[in-house]
Amino acid sequence: MFERPPFKDCGSCGQQSATGIVWISPSSFKRRCKFCKVSTSHPLPDLDKQVLYLDQFAITAIFQTKTGKLAPGAHHAKFWSEASGLLDRAIMRQQIICPASNIHRDETIVHYDSEALGLAHEMLGGDTSFENTTQIEHDQIFDYLDAYLKGQNAPRLEFNVDEILHGSRNAWLQDIHITAQMDWSAFVEDTRRARDDGAANLVSLYDRWATERPTFEQVLSHELSDAFATYIGGYLHFMSKAAAAMKSGDNEGFMQGALAPVVSLIHEINRVFTERGIPEAQALKETAKFFAWPQLQTLPAGWVSAHLFAAIADRLAKGQKRYPTRGMSNDIKVISVYGPYVDAMFLDNECADLLQQKSVAKGVNLKARIFCLKRKDEFLQYLQDLGDAAPVEVVEASRELYGDLD
């Protein structure tokens, strides 16, 4: 009863179309006969899958295409239909994965059909997901802290994509997907509020840039040198918020302040200094010195982000009237954090254009190949080439596990 297609003839009892798949592990699979119950195990070829980050709008468009909710005559409908088919082909040929991230989660839970959309994205990522963007940034900070404490220059990070993934990138896809349904409804309003508040804060910054008209270099210098204010200032803000909430008996407010990611980060760094013999009362002062270290300006997450914000300021200073879209803050976060690690990213046109701006391209060298709707033919060719490049033994194994791939 547990044998699943595709079925093959049994070599033991001779029954036709009798042996089915009963288990697929990351590197092997097992077949068993429905009749004689003889089972056989088989190794699977090694893989080296590429990692593609899909912007939320792309995930939604692919989801709508597969569910028939994207009208055939809709803008770019033909492209999304072709892209969806080629992406599925490359995924089933074990050549690529599209993991989900915490940014995707936050943007998915406010969608009207969040459960189905989230499941559709899970299927594109196999059993993998991205590490939280904040955690990756904090890990980079600790790499820099290690160099700082050793008196060395800023470290050269390797940007191994496997280090920022949960699950195995090169595991063969399971033919059964098990997911746990979670009710995120309690977080919807808070997520929307946080998104809208963040967008509103950026509008005031955009207003200032449009009025004061700073140069690209001025904004870049300010953004890169602002690590002290971002981290130490953020820490003091949330600690003050927690203290005020505790005094007023606001338990929820206390938790929001005391458990803020930046608070945890600073406490962890303080602990590093106390373990090295620095008195606890002096630890925060030493942590502040670290965040004032000039070489911390090259931290990849901050470096990329600073260039993108400087590019926005430059455009507004030169007369661009339209402000960036509401999701720009999240877009810059994922580009800055994931861009150095992944093989490719499909972004909106606005972000792709920012990365092409000469002042950005000169200072930012991402590993990721960048695609967008303006380069949709290139993206289709990329997916086509990936599927075509699958080794013969991988294609044959995939057909044995999942059936016809084309």
Image (tube, rainbow, N blue to C red):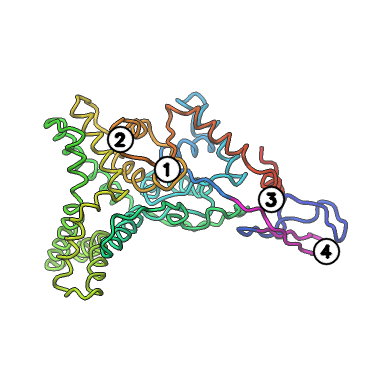
The answer to which of marks 3 and 4 sits earlier in the sequence is 4
| SS state under label 4 | loop
User: Which numbered marker is on residue 36?
Assistant: 4
Residue, disc 3: 401
Quarter of the image that includes the N terminus: bottom right
Q: Are marks 2 and 4 in contact (CB under 8 Å)?
A: no
Give the alpha-carbon distance from disc 3 to disc 2, as whole Å. Answer: 45 Å
| Magenta highlight range | 28-47
Badge 3: residue crowd in 10 Å (few <14, some 14–19, many ≥20): many
Q: Tell me: residue 379, above or below residue 262.
A: above
- Quadrant position of residue 14: bottom right
Residue, disc 2: 360
The answer to which of marks 1 and 2 sits earlier in the sequence is 2
Give the alpha-carbon distance from disc 2 to disc 4, as whole Å. Answer: 65 Å
| Apparent side of residue 233 relative to residue 22 in the rendered image (left or right) | left
Single out the mark in the foreground, 2 or 4: 2
Q: Tell me: residue 214, above or below residue 273.
A: above
Taking the magenta stretch, the answer to whether it contains residue 29 is yes
In the image, 366 versus 211, the foreground residue is 366
Taking the magenta stretch, the answer to whether it contains residue 38 is yes
- In the image, what residue occupies the spot 49% across and 34% down? 69
Q: Tell me: residue 176, above or below residue 205.
A: below
Badge 1: residue crowd in 10 Å (few <14, some 14–19, many ≥20): some
The answer to which of marks 2 and 4 sits earlier in the sequence is 4
